[in-house]
Amino acid sequence: MERILVALGGNALQQSGDRGRWDEAIRRMRATAPVLAGLAAQGDELLLTHGNGPQVGALLRQNELGESEIPPQPLHVLGAESEGEIGYLIQQELEPALRRRRVDRTVVTVVSRVEVSYRDPAFRHPSKPVGRYYDDAEAAAVRRQRRWVMREDPAGRGWRRVVPSPVPQRWVEGPAIERLFEAGLGRHWIPVVAGGGGIPVVRARDGRLVGVDAVIDKDRTASLVARQVHATVLAIVTDVPAAAVGFGGPAPRWLGRVSPKELARLSEAGEFAEGSMGPKVDAVLEFLRGGGRRAVITDIPCLRAALGGRAGTRVAG
C-alpha cells in the first residue's frame, strides 16, 4: 500500500473553451473520478489537492460586477470560497465512483491555510497574474482607485492585476491530517486539502494568523503537503501526458523515466516554462529531496499507467 498525493489540474477540472458552468465542471470531474476510485480500489491511501485559477478568476469578476450592491471580498477569502466549491464538486462525483467500486471511503474537504512569511521578497515584487484583462483606461482606473499592481501582457492582450506569490512554509492543518493517517484512517477517508495552493496567511505579532492577498503556487504547496503527511508518491496531474523537452516546437521529446539529476539539469537549462511545467518539475524535485520515494507528471487518462511505470514522466528518489 502506498500513500499517494494526487494534485489535480488541467483537464481534470476545466478545459480550455469551458465557460465555467457548473454542468461543465460536473462533466470534467465525472470523467476524472473513476481513475481516482481505481487507485483507492487498489488499497492505496489517497490525499487530493487541486488548482483554482479559473474559479477564483470568476469570483473576482463577480466581485467587480456586484460591488455596487455587495461589498467585494478580499482575494484570500475568494480562495477559501473556491476550496469549498471545488471540494464539494470532488465529493459529489468521487463518492459515487467509489461506491461503484465497492470502496467504503468518505471524501472530506478541509479548507486549508498555508503560512507564508511577510518578509518573503514576493510581497515587494508581485508577479502572479489574477483575474481578467483590462484595457489601458481600465488599468489606469483600477490602479488609481484600488491601488492594484498592474502589468501589461507581453502578448498584447491588455493589462492584468499581479499579486505576490510567496513560498509556502507550513500547512496549518497538516498535523491534524497527519495524525489521521497515522491512526489508520486513510483506509476510510480521502481528504481534499490546500486547494489552489491554500489560503495564504502570515503570523501577526500577537501570534494570530492573518489572511493576505496573494497566490501560492499550487504545485509547490502540493509538494509541501506531500512531505508533511509523509506521502510516498506525488502525482501531479496536468493536461499533457508527460513533461517534454522542446515542448511547443516541431519535435518535442516526451520524458518517460528520468533521474532527479537529469531532470534538474534540464530544468536549469530552461527546458520547462515558468508558470507552466517549470513549477511542476520544481515541486517533484523538492518532494524527492525531502524524502519522497517517487513522483509522476501526467494527465488523468494516463495516471494509473504512470503510477504503474508504463506512462508519464516518472522520477524516483
Image (cartoon, rainbow, N blue to C red):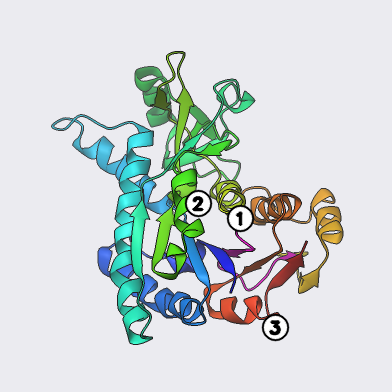
x%, y% of residue 228?
Answer: 58, 48
Residue bearing mark 1: 230
For the residues marked 2 and 1, what is the alpha-carbon distance in whole angstroms? Answer: 8 Å
For badge 2, the amino acid type reads Glu
Secondary structure at badge 1 equals loop
Quadrant containing the N terminus in the rendered view: bottom right
Q: Residue at x 48, y 61 (%)?
A: 47
Q: Mark 2 — residue?
A: 178
Report the side of 2 relative to 139 (left or right).
right
Residue 215 pos. (x, y %): 49, 38
- Residue 301 point in image, percent of width and height: 54, 79
Which residue is rendered at x = 30% and y = 78% of the image? 96
The amino acid at mark 1 is His
- Is residue 241 magenta-colored? yes
Left/right of residue 292 with respect to residue 134 in the rendered view: right
Discs 2, 1 touching: Cβ within 8 Å: yes
What segment carries the magenta color? Answer: 230-244
Q: Is residue 253 left or right of residue 134?
A: right
Dot 2, how many residues are within 10 Å of its Cα: few (below 14), some (14-19), or many (20+)?
some
Judged from the image, the secondary structure of the residue bearing numbered disc 2 is: helix
Q: Quadrant of residue 92?
A: bottom left
Badge number at residue 310: 3
> Where's the C terminus, which quadrant?
bottom right
Task: Measure how far apart labels 3 and 1 are at the Cα level.
Answer: 24 Å
Of the two numbered discs 3 and 1 in the rendering, the one whose residue sits closer to the viewer: 1
Residue pushed farthest top?
Answer: 205
Q: Is residue 311 above or below residue 126?
A: below
- Residue at the front extreme of this rendering: 183
Regarding residue 226, the answer to whether it shows in the image is yes
